């Protein structure tokens, strides 16, 4: 019987067949790809580029930030001047019928008025608008950081499911081979029929798992397409590459905590809100002083201007009770903005510590499974298969060794995907890629 080849040799044969099938499929689909372009999904960067261009939620927050920036100039501008026209003595002391002709009435006043806020109010209004625009920019950055994290997490899940599908297909092929070994031994009177039945049951269970994984893959693909503003059933390329995890030297907790305080978009937005609240409070105190209105009044008599007048108007801030109430309101809003910023910072710092710990655990798990668990499981399987073919162990031992290989591979795949997800969370907290 020619059943002495190892799991690794079998996997290489399966990979060669899969590669051949992939090349054949690529040749058949080449005209379609030439017309429609290669679908995104081979790496996460292709998805991020598409989302930045097409995601409607991100487009909305960018437009809101742009709108907030346009308010700055208007906030610091003077109000439009006003013109008042007064026609006096329309009947010329009863000597004519009433008329609206400026040259035929007793006199006509043309009053041009300009409102002038108290000194410093316009600057404060402009600074408030600047802080509000900064806050809108911070929220736009936070929106992108959140969207990018969702895409990166979704891609990690997509990769995990795709790799599990490939692994399960290899295991199914391996179980087919084990069934053949069991049938050969049973035909030779060297094994019981139960070995063949157990192998068939294992194959059936694996086929059920493949069905579930294919459904999970379609679900993950649909969720990613929604984030990319594509049809839910649009094609995505099979995930090929994961981003390299940053080395431990770049994950110093204190250094990243400082980057979080300086770069996190939510902290930036809260800082802008504090600045706007401070300027709003200062503007409220400025309202203790009156606003002015200046006017120039040329007076027309007959067909010419005979007189010039100047006017000054101001409001009298007598309602001190309401002003003090507004001042206390402004102080309370400032205190609330500062507390909100502190709460946001504390929450993000806690998330940073948890994320760094989870990222380190995922890295170590992936390394352990690749360096020790998987090689040990493969050695165990080769030994169990050889022993079974020689009648030294039962079929259950071979199946258990096969399960150990699968578990070790799944552990490695899961740790890689978990590391990518935690890296996405870390970059969301920092507001930038590492």
Image (tube, rainbow, N blue to C red):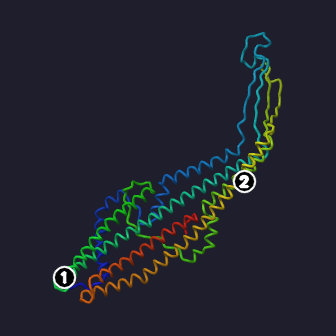
Within 10 Å of disc 2 (Cα), the crowding (few <14, some 14-19, many 20+) is many
Left or right of 293: which side holds 261? left
Point out residue 293 in the picture as x, y percentages from the top left corner. Answer: 78, 36
Total labels drawn? 2
Mark linked to residue 215: none
Quadrant of the rendering where the C terminus is positioned: bottom right
Which one is nearer the viewer's eye here, 279 or 215?
215
Which one is nearer the viewer's eye here, 27 or 396?
396
Residue 103 seen from this side? yes
Point out residue 68 in the picture as x, y percentages from the top left corner. Answer: 62, 49
Quadrant of the rendering where the N terminus is positioned: bottom left
Mark linked to residue 184: 1
- Where is 39 relative to 71, above or below? below
Left or right of 40: which side holds 402? left
Left or right of 402: which side holds 103? right
Left or right of 207: which side holds 249? right
Residue at (49% x, 76% y) in the render: 363
Quarter holding residue 16: bottom left
Q: Earlier in the sequence, mark 1 or mark 2?
A: 1
Within 10 Å of disc 1 (Cα), the crowding (few <14, some 14-19, many 20+) is some
What is the distance, in whole Å, between disc 1 and disc 2 at their CAs?
A: 84 Å
Point out residue 425 in the picture as x, y percentages from the top left corner. Answer: 53, 66
- Which residue in the rendered view is the most extreme toward the top? 95
Point out residue 341 in the picture as x, y percentages from the top left corner. Answer: 65, 59
Mark linked to residue 278: 2
- Where is 312 relative to 413, above or below? above
Residue at (32% x, 81% y) in the render: 400
- Tell me the SS state at disc 1: helix
Quarter holding residue 390: bottom left
State yes or no: discs 1 and 2 in contact (Cβ < 8 Å).
Answer: no
Residue at (61% x, 70% y) in the render: 256
- Where is 150 relative to 243, above or below? above
């Amino acid at each position: 019987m020619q059943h002495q080849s190892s799991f690794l040799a079998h996997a290489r044969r399966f990979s060669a067949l899969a590669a051949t099938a992939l090349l054949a499929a690529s040749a058949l689909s080449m005209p379609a790809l030439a017309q429609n372009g290669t679908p995104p999904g081979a790496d996460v960067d292709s998805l991020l580029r598409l989302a930045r261009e097409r995601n409607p939620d991100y487009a909305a927050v960018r437009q809101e930030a742009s709108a907030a920036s346009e308010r700055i100039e208007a906030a610091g501008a003077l109000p439009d001047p006003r013109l008042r026209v007064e026609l006096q003595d329309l009947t010329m002391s009863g000597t004519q019928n009433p008329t609206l002709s400026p040259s035929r009435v007793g006199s006509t006043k043309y009053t041009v008025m300009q409102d002038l806020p108290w000194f410093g109010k316009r600057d404060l209004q402009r600074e408030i608008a600047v802080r509000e625009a900064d806050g809108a920019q911070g929220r736009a950055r936070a929106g992108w950081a959140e969207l990018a994290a969702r895409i990166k997490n979704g891609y990690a899940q997509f990769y995990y499911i795709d790799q599990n599908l490939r692994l399960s297909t290899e295991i199914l092929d391996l179980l087919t081979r084990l069934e053949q070994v069991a049938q050969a031994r049973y035909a030779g009177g060297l094994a019981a029929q139960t070995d063949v039945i157990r192998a068939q049951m294992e194959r059936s269970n694996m086929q059920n798992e493949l069905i579930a994984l294919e459904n999970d893959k379609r679900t993950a693909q649909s969720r990613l397409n929604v984030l990319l503003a594509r049809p839910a059933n649009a094609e995505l390329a099979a995930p090929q590459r994961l981003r390299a995890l940053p080395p431990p030297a770049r994950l110093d907790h204190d250094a990243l905590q400082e980057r979080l305080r300086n770069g996190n978009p939510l902290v930036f937005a809260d800082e802008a809100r504090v600045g706007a609240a401070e300027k709003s409070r200062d503007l409220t105190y400025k309202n203790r002083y009156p606003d002015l209105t200046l006017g120039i009044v040329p007076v027309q008599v007959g067909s010419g201007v005979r007189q010039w007048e100047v006017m000054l108007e101001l409001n009298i801030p007598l309602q001190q009770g309401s002003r003090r109430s507004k001042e206390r309101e402004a102080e309370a809003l400032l205190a609330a903005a500062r507390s909100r910023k502190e709460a946001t910072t504390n929450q993000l710092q806690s998330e940073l510590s948890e994320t760094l710990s989870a990222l380190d655990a995922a890295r170590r798990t992936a390394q352990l499974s690749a360096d020790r668990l998987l090689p040990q499981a493969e050695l165990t399987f080769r030994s169990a298969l050889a022993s079974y073919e020689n009648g030294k162990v039962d079929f259950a031992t071979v199946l258990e060794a096969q399960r150990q290989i699968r578990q070790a591979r799944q552990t490695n795949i899961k740790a890689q995907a978990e590391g990518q997800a935690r890296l996405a969370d870390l970059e969301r907290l920092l507001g930038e890629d590492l």
